[in-house]
Amino acid sequence: MAYSEQQIRGLAINFLRQHYKLRPRSGTSGTRVVSRVHYYAGVTIDARLAYQKPDLSWFTATVEATSLNKANEILFWINRFRILVHALLITLAVFVAGMALTQVLGKSLWEMFGRPDVYLFLALTFVLIFVTAAASLRSLRYYRYIYAIAQFMRFHADAQWVAFDREIFATDTTHVYFEELQRQCIRFGFGLLEVREDNKVRWLIEPSHIDQFGGSRSQLPLWVAAIQAPPLVANLRKALPFKRSTAPAAAPQLAPPVPTDGVTDPLSVGNYLPSTAPNFDYTAPLLPATKGRPAWYRRPRRLWQHLHWEIRHAIRGLYPEEIKKRPGYYELPGWVVAALPTLLLLFAYLCYLHSRWEPIATENQVAAAPDLTPLETAASPAASGASDALLPGEYDHRRSGTGPPPEADIRVTDDLVSEADIPRAVELFRIAADGESTTSYNCLALYRLTSTYYVLEEGRYPDFETASERARYLNGRYGLEATAALLSCLEVGGQGYLVYVGEILTSGADASLFFRQYRNDFGLELEMLQVN
């Protein structure tokens, strides 16, 4: 026999009356009340039993009645929303930990996989970790959601009972759902009633008399518990042994006699004139009417309340339709709400740090390219005479692997070797970006031409060996086109050699552009030389 929800509600209330030894309400002296379906704070209370105790406090018991046609109220669902959020949280935490460790070790995912393979690696790894975490979390009992239990978890009552029809768990396939319902009732301190054949109610679990939630739930207000209940104070007042003083009854007002002459109208009130104060001028002008509602800018508080309601209504419009049918299903703990944006920002910042890696070596970069490990001992930089300010694995170009080179005075003075003292001097030595070098013994003097030229000067050196060595270093270190040219090819009477990067330019705008680019990207200290 399948019971309706109304029948289960009535049987449960009758059982609770007997359980708490309550008398049925009679007249106005009873102190017990049974209230049927009630809605409070978005939760449906199928039945409620409340009475006032001798200490004037209220005892309230609520019942969730579930019939066979509403079995989904006590059968658990998998909370997929919370699983997806927690799986996303775990995935971001793993990514942040892994990328932070890689950054500390001086490596970069962009260096390991390169572009665009690194983006495919990140996407596949993200999906793999997310799916694995979601599949693992789905098997946990924490994510089993029961509608009746979720309602009781939102508010506190002295006793909360779940009453259900026995036919819901009559089949063999529902034993898992019944075990989960019992487990959650015991865990959260809720009672359990089973409605059997012949209107019999079986008591399965007694509700806990200690709040399992530590007072974190909202208390039912007094008006919910005391609705339709006669106050106990009235009965106590009647039992007081004091004399009651009553006010004397007012004399009855007799109606005027009805005229019987047949002429006078019984409904006539005579000549009625309004009583007025002396010298009252009825023709005095009345006060002008004013608007009943002030302007909106004169009521900022009311305007703010209206805007707040509009914003709240718009946000609630984004919620799914099932949010009203599943209390607590889409709610998240506060630590999850705070951790998600934090991990997202950390993940974005680490991606930015990893993406800054470039194959060309930059200043103070640990993983510099090309690899200069054979030239500098990373374990003991002091043995090779390197500076103590260098990072492990960083190469000091001013030193060699065996010891400091002899100091060379590169200041341009009048005592330096002139061009005439160099037999068959190399006037132009160019190294292209791909490393191919060309040597020329004749150069075209730019200052003899009519146009204006711009050269990005890196430095001036006294001899060809020092200048060519510097040009080779710039090419190997930064991959730039470098040229060592005789200074007399650029300036009248110039002595020594000049090293410049890039091409000889004819536009001042282009020269300024490359000047800033080389300074920002490679940290080179250059000077822009204008040759007329």
Image (tube, rainbow, N blue to C red):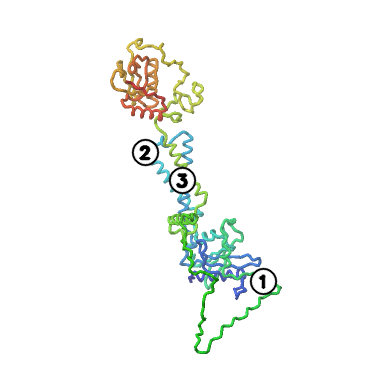
Type of residue at label 2? Answer: Pro
Q: Would you say 41 lies left or right of 243 here?
A: left
Residue 321's place in the image compared with 456, above or below, is below
The numbered mark, 1 or 2, whose residue comes first in the sequence reads 2
The numbered mark, 1 or 3, whose residue comes first in the sequence reads 3
For mark 3, give the secondary structure: helix
| Residue lying at the far front of the rendered structure | 279
Q: Which of 531 and 372 is in front in this view?
A: 531
Q: Would you say 513 lies left or right of 348 here?
A: left
Question: Within 10 Å of the Cα at label 2, are there few (<14), some (14-19), or many (20+) other Cα atoms?
Answer: few
Q: Distance between the residues labelled 3 and 2?
A: 22 Å
Per the image, the residue denoted by label 3 is 91
Type of residue at label 3? Answer: Thr
Q: Do the residues labelled 1 and 3 touch (CB within 8 Å)?
A: no
Q: Do the residues labelled 1 and 2 touch (CB within 8 Å)?
A: no
Q: Nearer the viewer, mark 1 or mark 2?
A: 1
On the image, the x and y values in percent for residue 443 come to: 30, 17
Q: How many numbered tags mark residues here? A: 3
